[in-house]
Every structure is written in structure tokens, then in C-alpha cells.
Amino acid sequence: MKTLFEKIWDAHVVKKIENGPEVLYIDRHFIHEVTSPQAFNGLRERKIPVFRPAQVVATADHNVPTINQHLPIQDELSRLQVNKLNDNCKEFGIDLYGLNHPKQGIVHIIGPELGYTLPGSTIVCGDSHTATHGAFGTIAFGIGTSEVEMVLATQCLLQYRPKKMRIIVNGLLEKGVTSKDIILYLISKLTAGGGTGYFIEYSGSAIQRLSMEERMTICNMSIEMGARGGIIAPDEKTFEYVKGREFAPKGADYDKLLAHWKTLFSDKGATFDKEYVFDASDISPMITYGTNPGMGMKINGLIPAGNGSSTDADKADLKKSLDYMGFSPNESLIGKKIDYVFIGSCTNGRIEDLRMAAKIIKGHKKAENVTVWIVPGSKLVEEQAIAEGLKDIFEAAGIPFRQPGCSACLAMNDDKIPAGKYCVSTSNRNFEGRQGPGSRTLLAGPLVAAAAAITGKIVDPTEFLN
Amino acid sequence: MEKLVKIESTCVPVNISNIDTDQIIPARFLKATSREGFGDNLFRDWRYNNDHSPKTDFPLNNPKYKGAILVAGKNFGCGSSREHAAWAIVGAGFKVVVSSFFADIFKNNALNNGLLPVQVSDDFLTKLFIKIENDVNTSVVVDLENQSIQTKDGSLKDSFEINSYKKTCLLNGYDDIDYLLNIKNEIQVFEQSFN
């Protein structure tokens, strides 16, 4: 009796070192411009090639501008780093979705979109949100640059088996509650370090009912609990999503794999080191009030006062966070004026996210006090949003529809939130300065963000859904 | 990789919990294509004001704190997988980070750069912060061979876990990649059986 995770992991163990880690084979390696250059330098110093270039896929996403992408990148260091990726991919024979490629986009969006992400596989990338791909029943996790070099050199990593956690969410979601609210809710319950050392399987009827894109949003933020990754058993929705994608197997190859994919679930009686059960009806639209993703609450709730069982360190942590955010204990955030809205990122930059935002924004104008950035996750998402008329809806509201990239999620490009300003953001991290030095981030789902865009303040989005 | 056996040093305390890698090295400093130079921007936004003047109350700017051991609050290194965080800490001259809890990816990144994460009990950490606050010259001995950490005066002691493989690597200065390159034949055999 094995868990879903164990079935995939065990199939990828090349060997076990006595009293040591296992050598884990990696099927798919995604790379981007920020965490790969030093790894390629390492290969050059060792005078070795990329071992399996066909299993590596590259994209430029972290550093790219989200306007005027046809022009050379203005920031010199960003330009050099993106150019370095181009050169490295050319030298080592790696397929690249670089800036201006018609299918460029955020690495965790284009992987599934192009059919590179397949159930039952192992996937790594020098990016902690690699957990996203777990939505397909893959073991996907983020690695550091030394490890990027190892995978480039040998297609393997030395890994210790993480502990197993299962989070079950049963029941029906209320209207206006998105999968982003589910994951923000779970992180608020388990805390920002509650998953450290674990790989999390998400299951239960509420998870099964989610679309593939919604599942990606959940798995994406597993790392925000400290978990190595998150995984969801593949089902008909998964198989249907993968089928026919550009690089997914076709015909008899697909059928053969499909038979294997159908065996990928946790056996009845398989055991977990930790298990949590939640009821979907307890989840409301969420928002964060602090400076780590575990500091989240129901949008209609009150900021906690740090009473109860928390330690002195936890209390100091909460005070430091609230001071940074300019909030007080027991404060409600409803009606609070905000300055920026960012809709995008590998968490919420897919077509379904843009459709949700458009549903609320349609027929309204952007509030005057707010700057709104809507950034599609990939060129294909951008194309589809244009075809569906979403771009027109945004532009009619006075919101420009930008070009794909990581953008204000980590503000490596020019999309920075100024010091002291509040941003309701559909991204994944509310750390101090994450969206620019001094920026104040409130994480939320696309409905909350879109409602903030048209009202200029924090409001419960459900009132706009009738 | 440089060998790491035993470190004896005074400490630099940063008594903050949940220090994420965006604080250790903000994203805007990740544009370099080499591993060098990140130390200057370690804890950049906690260390410097917007006009680049140093914030004198931050421990790294306080001349009374120096040494090769960084002591930090629990859940150190959470967030982004950026190895630049480990490079920044090493670049600023640290060889050991002491905390009561480390994020997984950071721990791997540190070990791959010869930086030893020493996970101690909450109690030891609290007492160590107090001791350093009372005496900035508190010397701490980290002994990898014996997996022990103690103040030189012997008043505070704790042991720490490290897996035996990683321990051997650090004691001898071996990299994971050397090991993997040596078993390439086995990897190829695995690939054939797998496909």
C-alpha cells in the first residue's frame, strides 16, 4: 500500500546511498534566467555538457518588462541576464521560450499549457513555485542553483524522502470562494512553516471538483507552508487537459501512458505522517494582513491580537508585521483604501483567473485612486484573453492589459509598488518589500482583487456576483 | 567546496522569526550572473535606508557584533528557493547559521555552499540570544564531528542533527555533483530500464 507520492518517487529512484540520500531521476527540468546562469558557469568550469538537453525547457519570465516587449530591455542588468539565458540555451542545445517567442510566459504556466507537465513524472526548477505542477499528479519541487547544475549535468538529484502529509477538503464551496481562498485558508491554519519537511497530497471532494487551473493555484502555494511540494491525484480532468497539448504524447504513446496514469492515487490504507481534514463551507474569501502568507483571514474578519497560545516570538513577529503594514490588532480591513491592484503571477495568471476578474470588472470603471496591473501568465493566455474579449473589458474600465511575465509578484522588472503603498495582489508572497522596497502587499484571489480595482478599497467580492 | 570541521567565533544575532529569503537578499539584487558580490546586499532593506545610509540599529551594522556565526529566529530561510540567499550569507563572511527551525530549500542551498545550518532547540536559541545580548564577546564553538554547539564557557550546550552523508561531504569538502558525475553509468542504465 503506497501513497500517490510514494508510487512516483519509488519509480524514480536510481539508487539509495547507504545511510544517505536517494538518487532521484528527474524527467523534466524547467529553467529561467535568474537561477540558471551560475549553473551554466559551473558546467563550463567542469568542461561538461548538459546531459539530457531534450528534457530541459527554458523561458525568460522573472526579469522581463510587461510593456513594449518588442523593444530592448531598458534595465541593463535585466537585459544582460536575459541575453545570457539566450546564449546558454544556444550553447548547450536547450529549447527556449525567450522574450518575444509566441509561446513565452511564466515557467509554471507554459509547462502545463504546452504539455510538458505530465502525470507521474518528476519535475524540478530553480523556483520554489515549481510545486504548481503537482496539480497533475507529479512530484514537482523547487531547487537551488547548485542543484540546477546537478540536474543539468546528470538529470539527477540527491534527495531525502520528505515526510507525507494529506490535507482533505470536503464539501461545497460558497459562492465567491475561489481556490486561492482555499489555499490562503489552509496556510492560515497550518502557518508559514507548518508544512516544512513534508510533501502534501491534497484530496477530498472539494479538491476533486476543482478545474486543473484551480488545482494549480492550490499546489502553487504549498511552499508558502514550507512544504517541498503539493500533489493531487490525476483524474479524467487531468487526462483531458493533457490530451492533445503540443508536447504531450499522442496516439498509442498517450494510451500507454494513460493506463499508467490511472494507477496514480494513494492506495486505500496507505498511511501519512500527518493528516488534516477541513470543511469547504468554512472557507470565505480571504485576504492577508501581515508579512507572511500564513497571516491570512476571512475578508470580513478582524486582524488577530496575538492572544491565545502564541509565544513571545510569535507576538513579536505579529507586532513587527502589523507595524510594517500600518495595521492594528482587531482592525477590520473592509473599506480600507488601497493604492494598487496586481492580477497575475504563476498563482493566478491563467485564463480562468482573468475570466473571474473580467466578470467583476465588466461594465465598471477602475477606481480613480488605484493603479491596476493585469498581467497574463503567458502569450497563449494573452492571446486567448484577447479572443474572448477580456482585454476589451479591462480596457473599457481604464485598465491596460499588459504582456506576460512574473511582473509585480517579485518586482524584478519595473513593475514595483512604491514604498508605503498598499497593493491587493493575486500573487503568492506578502513578505516585506516583496513587490518593491517598502511595499505593502495584501494577498487575495482574483475576485477580491478585481473588486478592489473598481472600488479602490477592500470589499467582499460576493456583492458583485449577483 | 571548502572543508568545514570546527568553528569557534563570536556571533551576530538577528532576533527575528520567519526571515524569508526576500529579506536575506531582495529580488532586485538577483540580476548578477556569477556567485560573487551578494554579501554586500545581505539583509539589504533591513540594513540600509532608502538613501543608502546604514540603519545603525541593525545588528550587522553594529560594530560590536562580529563573527562567523549568524544567529536568527525560527523558520529561517523560508520563501523563495534563491540560492543567492546562501551566497549572500557566505559572502558576508558567515560559516554557520544557528536557528531553531530552517526552511528545507534554504537548508539544502546552505549545505551545497559549505554553510552549516545548525538547528537548535527553542530554549537554547532563546538563551543564546540573551547571552549574546548580555555579552557581545560570547564565543560559541560549533563542532561538526561531534554535532555539538556550545558557548565557550560551557554554560549553554546543545546537539544538532545532520545526516551522515552531508556531514561527510562537509568534513571533506565534497560536492553532491562530484558524486552524481561518478555514477553516470548507473544513471544511464536506469534510463534504459525506465523507458
Image (spheres, rainbow, N blue to C red):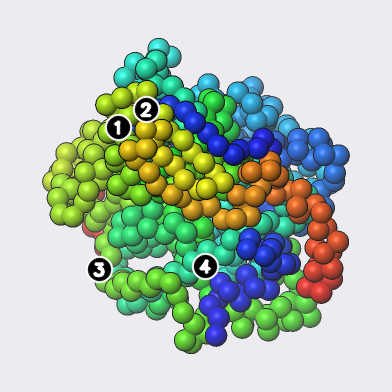
Cα gap from disc 1 to disc 4, whole angstroms:
44 Å
Which of the two discs, 2 and 4, sits closer to the camera?
A: 2
**Of the numbered discs in the image, which one, if any, rests on residue A422?**
none
* Number of disc labels: 4
Residue A39, placed above or below residue B180: above
Nearer the observer: mark 1 or 4; the answer is 1
User: Looking at the image, which is closer to me, A421 or B149?
Assistant: B149
Q: Position of residue A61 (x, y in %)?
A: 61, 41
Label 3 and label 2 in one chain: no
Q: SS for tag 4?
A: strand
Q: Pick the residue in front: B132 or A203.
A: B132
Query: Callout 2: few (<14), some (14-19), or many (20+) C-alpha neighbours within 10 Å?
Result: some
Residue of label 2: B138
* Residue at (18, 48) in percent of width and height: A306
Circle 1 packing at 10 Å, graded few (<14), some (14-19), many (20+), is some
The amino acid at mark 2 is Thr
Chain ID, mark 1: B
Helix, strand, or loop for circle 1?
Answer: helix
Q: Mark 4 points at which residue?
A: A231
Residue A292's place in the image compared with A324, above or below, is below
Q: Which amino acid does label 4 sit on?
A: Ile
Pinpoint residue B45: horizontal percent, then vertical percent: 41, 25
Q: Viewer-nearest of labels 3 and 1?
A: 1
- Label 4 near label 2: C-beta < 8 Å? no
Q: Mark on residue A282?
A: 3
Q: Which residue appears at 38% of the width and 73% of the height?
A: A275
Q: Earlier in the sequence, mark 1 or mark 2?
A: 1
Outermost bottom residue = A268
Residue labelled with disc 1 = B131
- Quadrant in which residue A282 is drawn: bottom left
